[in-house]
Amino acid sequence: MIELNVCIGSACHIHGSHNVVATFQHLIEKYGLHDKVTLKGAFCMKECSAAGVAVSFAGKTQRIHPEEARMFFKEQILPLAEKE
């Protein structure tokens, strides 16, 4: 099971975490990944100084912009889910 965490703290909220979460929810549904990907909200991942929204999965954290969420999911999460 892949645990995908999206920061919903105030800095990430301002940078569009709601849109990232909505995009990820849509893609999990679209690809039927409910049994392979768990989407969770998290508060402060200590990445507040950079632009974008903090996202963690598979032991790593990175920041993405809401407009990059779809590509990020397809390039990073989907290949991991296919291995599950």
Image: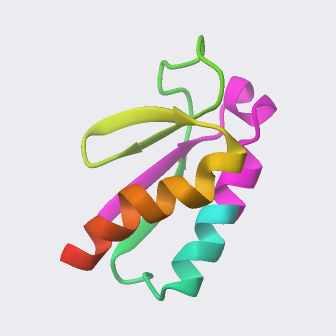
Which residue lies at the image location 66% right of the left edge and 31% below the top edge?
A: 9
Q: Is residue 31 left or right of residue 84?
A: right
Quarter of the image with the N terminus in it: bottom left
Visible residue check, residue 55: yes
Badge count: 0
The residue sitting at the right extreme is: 14
Which residue lies at the image location 50% right of the left edge and 53% below the top edge?
A: 72
Residue 25 coordinates in the image, percent (x, y):
62, 70
Q: In the rendered view, would you say 73 is above or below 59?
A: below
> Start and end of the magenta stretch?
1-22
Q: In the rendered view, would you say 76 is above or below 7?
A: below
Query: Viewer-proximal residue, 63 or 44?
Result: 63
Q: In the rendered view, would you say 82 is above or below 67?
A: below
Q: Is residue 38 left or right of residue 68?
A: left
Q: In the rendered view, would you say 53 is above or below 23?
A: above
Residue 68 coordinates in the image, percent (x, y):
62, 48
Residue 13 coordinates in the image, percent (x, y):
75, 35
